[in-house]
Each structure stands twice: as structure tokens, then as C-alpha cells.
Amino acid sequence: SVLKALLMHVAVDTSSKGATGGINGPIFPDESFEFIPIPENPNNTTETRTYSTLKANNVKHGSFISDFVPSDIQDYLVHFDPDFENFTYADPSDMKKSKRGGMLKKLSMGDYIFFVASLVPFKKSAYANNDRKEICKYQKGKMAKYIIGYFEIKNILQFEKTRNELKPLDDTIPQSILEQVKHNSHSKRNSDAFIVAIGKKDRETALLRKAIQITSIGAPFRANHIGKKIYGDVAYPRGFKIIRDEKNIHALLRLAKNHS
């Protein structure tokens, strides 16, 4: 089959005040960054991690993820998806809720998924009071889209979660895959039906060490020279893009490996 890659926008941004956190993640001068997951609905999950308990990657700049978010969400539970340590990413299988699950279905073994986030250059003073207005005022118009992680697809599977049971829609799933999937945020919900991309665990983490900028700064997020090379001269606000050009996918993989 033809090699495909999916670019999937994840993490916090300002596209929706509540659902996506209403702020952007930080990128530091050395191109390292923080992955800030979106908030989780507290009424439908067994998740216990909050922004205040998630350790930051860049200890020079903050100890916990809560150092990079406004105080009004610091104690919110997190929807930690993608799960970069266990190489999974899931979306609702109900296409009315989200078109993203349908995009995952287009991928097969050996394809790739790349994760995109909205990041803004870090400025310590903007976070001094963890004040939403101050952070937003500083970040306005300074964000760009970056690739922050990726993995090679091992399986695309559908699961249903009822109160105490995670059920694959296909009965013959190896234990190792269940182990990967059970850590995903969608598995931790009391009830959910989801499609999950399961990655080949071929390294410590699916997160890149340094982010790869793919758009110019600010809306409408036009492709920069790298973006143009990979997916063409189009804007990329949120959502997803599918790439079917093998040459472009290999170029992106080389870049990603250099940033790992």
C-alpha cells in the first residue's frame, strides 16, 4: 500500500476557550518545548494527573506543567493524549463528535502520525503571576505551529469502554497492545468509544527533543519553507492534514529523527 502520514493538531491552543485551554505551550530558545495537554472532563474519568502534578521537561524554566498555564486551570485534570510514553493516540469513533477518528482509520501498519502543537517563545515575565490575561496578552499573534512528536503505526483499533471494562471490537488482540492502550486518556474514561493509533515503541518517547516549526508566525498560519515542502502552500490553523507523497514523508522523517 502507498505510504501515508497524518499531521494531527494536539495540545492546548486558543481555538476554543474551554476545550483547548485557551493558551499556547512554550517553546524555549534551544527549540525544546513543553507539551501541554488539553483539560479533561472531570465527570467522566479515572485520571488523577493534573497540570500541577505533571513534571515539566524543561526544569530550567519550571518544575511542573502548572508553571506554564493560568492559575484558573492549574488543578484541572489533563487529557494526556497523545500518550507519548506508550505511543498511542485516540479519538472518538463517533464521527458526529469528531472527524479525527475517521482520519485515523485511513492509516495502516507502517504509516506515520505526526503531532502538531501551537507554541509561543517563552518569556518568564509573562508567566510570573500565572494570570490568564497577562499570558494571553503576551502570546497574542506570536504563535506558530510545530511538529512535537511522531510514531510509526503498528495498528489502528477500535475500543469501547464501559464503567469497568475496556473492550476491543476485535477479540484477538495481544496483551502487549492492551498494555499500551490502557494508559490512554480515552481508556480512563468511564464510558467512551474510540479509535486508537498504536505506535511501534522504537524509542524512549514519541516526543521530539526539539520542535520543528512548520508555519509562519500568527494566523492564518501559512506554511513556512518546511511546511511548503511537506504539505504545500496552504494554511494550517488546527485539525489535520494527510500527506501521500512518499518523498515528502521521508524528508519529514529525516527532520524528525534529527530533532529526536
Image (cartoon, grey):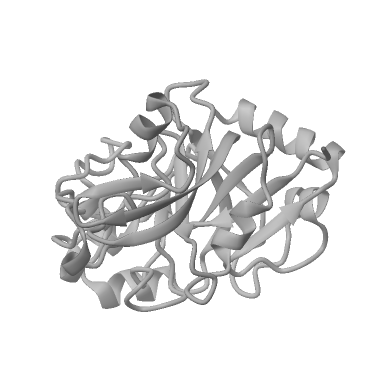
Asked if residue 130 can be seen in this view, the reply is no
Which x, y percent locates residue 171? 45, 38
Q: Which residue is depicted at the point 21% across and 65% down?
A: 44
Which x, y percent locates residue 149? 52, 40
Left or right of 85 on screen, residue 49: left
Q: How many circles with numbers are drawn on the protein?
A: 0
Left or right of 172 on screen, residue 244: right
138 and 166: which is toward the camera = 166
Asked if residue 84 can be seen in this view, the reply is yes
124 and 217: which is toward the camera = 217
Residue 18, by quadrant, is bottom left
Residue 154, by quadrant, is top right
Quadrant location, the C terminus: top right
Q: Which residue is depicted at the point 25% across and 51% down?
A: 188
Q: Which residue is depicted at the point 13% across and 60% down?
A: 75
245 and 224: which is toward the camera = 245
- Tell me: residue 125, above or below residue 34: below
Which x, y percent locates residue 221? 65, 68
Q: Which residue is depicted at the point 71% across and 69% down?
A: 235
Quadrant location, the N terminus: top right
